[in-house]
């Protein structure tokens, strides 16, 4: 009997960030100035409001409101991750949208992604060097309410106001060194796959009972680089326990950062246990 495991590593978006060290290389933050915001007192708020109107218009169509109602969620959250080129245009390969529902992602995200192609040319202030790529995270969260008149969406105030671009570094394995972010990500994925492969042990009881399938693992790498908050969902507790055992054996990692400040970073790793 042949046994195997397939692995795919997904690094989630970072959690919110609060500005601290004004004198670091990360500040002042990169600013994207929308053409309609040239004369605005708060150009970041102006950009946020322009994009929010576009997001709301997409979500508020009859088709999408019907889909949102069927999702049976209390809220719907949209994230835009924007990365600009040196010319002030959006980098279409690296910019993307995300919605907090698997049921909605394939049906509404294509509409949201169309707005990325329609973005005008920005003026870019405080542009960083190529090895310090700024990401602009804009979050829009709506309360879903049902009434006799139909489903309505009400914008929830964002406590972490958009202040400009953020420079991220991902957690680092001991052997990955201080490479740039793209090389660090590749090294992280390779080391994670090596770690799981080296410690993988298909439980004997699961083999005897023919238990197989995919275990989804979510965990957090903390500000100190330690792995915490491990959660699993899979076809059987035996496979889930093996997945947890492997993750608990991870070494101490270098923490992820946002603008030089250590932050918590959530990860998702599906492990597929196969019996052939």
Image (tube, rainbow, N blue to C red):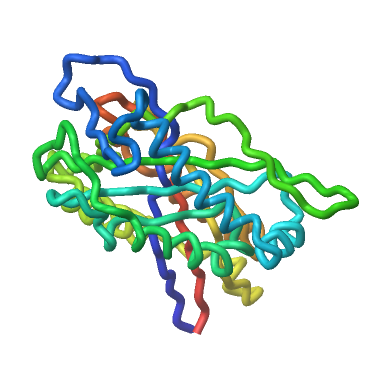
Above or below residue 19? Residue 249 is below
Q: Residue at x 57, y 46 (%)?
A: 77
Above or below residue 79? Residue 59 is below
Nearest the eye: 264 or 209: 264
Q: Residue at x 33, y 36 (%)?
A: 37
In the rendered structure, the answer to whether residue 134 lies left or right of residue 115 reads left
Q: Residue at x 47, y 27 (%)?
A: 160
Is there any visible trace of residue 244 in the rendered image?
no
Res. 223 image quadrant: top left
Nearest the eye: 71 or 201: 71
Number of numbered discs: 0
x and y, in percent, of residue 177 in the image:
13, 41
x and y, in percent, of residue 54 in the image:
50, 52
Res. 216 image quadrant: bottom right
Q: Residue at x 90, y 51 (%)?
A: 148
In the rendered structure, the answer to whether residue 242 lies left or right of residue 115 reads right
Q: Give the residue furthest to the front.
A: 39
Q: Give the residue furthest to the right.
A: 148
x and y, in percent, of residue 215 in the image:
55, 61
x and y, in percent, of residue 89 in the image:
22, 54
Is there any visible trace of residue 37 in the rendered image?
yes
């Amino acid at each position: 009997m042949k046994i195997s495991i397939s692995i795919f590593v997904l690094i989630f978006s970072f959690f919110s960030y609060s500005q601290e060290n004004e004198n670091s290389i990360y500040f002042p933050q990169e600013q994207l100035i929308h053409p309609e915001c040239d004369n605005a007192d708060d150009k970041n708020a102006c950009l946020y409001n322009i994009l929010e109107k576009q997001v709301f218009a997409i979500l508020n169509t009859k088709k999408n409101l019907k889909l949102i109602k069927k999702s049976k969620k209390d809220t719907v959250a949209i994230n835009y991750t924007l990365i600009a080129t040196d010319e002030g245009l959006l980098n279409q390969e690296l910019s993307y949208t995300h919605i907090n529902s698997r049921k909605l992602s394939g049906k509404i995200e294509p509409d949201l992604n169309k707005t990325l192609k329609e973005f005008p040319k920005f003026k870019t202030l405080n542009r960083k060097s190529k090895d310090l790529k700024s990401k602009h995270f804009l979050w829009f969260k709506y309360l879903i309410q049902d009434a006799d008149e139909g489903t309505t969406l009400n914008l929830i105030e964002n406590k972490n106001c958009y202040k400009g671009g953020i420079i991220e570094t991902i957690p680092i394995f001991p052997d990955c060194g201080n490479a740039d972010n793209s090389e660090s990500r590749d090294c992280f994925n390779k080391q994670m796959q090596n770690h799981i492969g080296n410690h993988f042990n298909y439980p004997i009881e699961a083999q005897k009972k023919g238990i197989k399938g995919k275990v989804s693992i979510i965990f957090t790498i903390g500000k100190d680089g330690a792995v915490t908050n491990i959660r699993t969902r899979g076809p059987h507790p035996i496979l889930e326990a093996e997945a947890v055992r492997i993750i608990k054996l991870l070494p101490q990692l270098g923490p992820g950062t946002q603008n030089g400040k250590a932050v918590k970073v959530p990860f998702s790793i599906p492990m597929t246990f196969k019996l052939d």
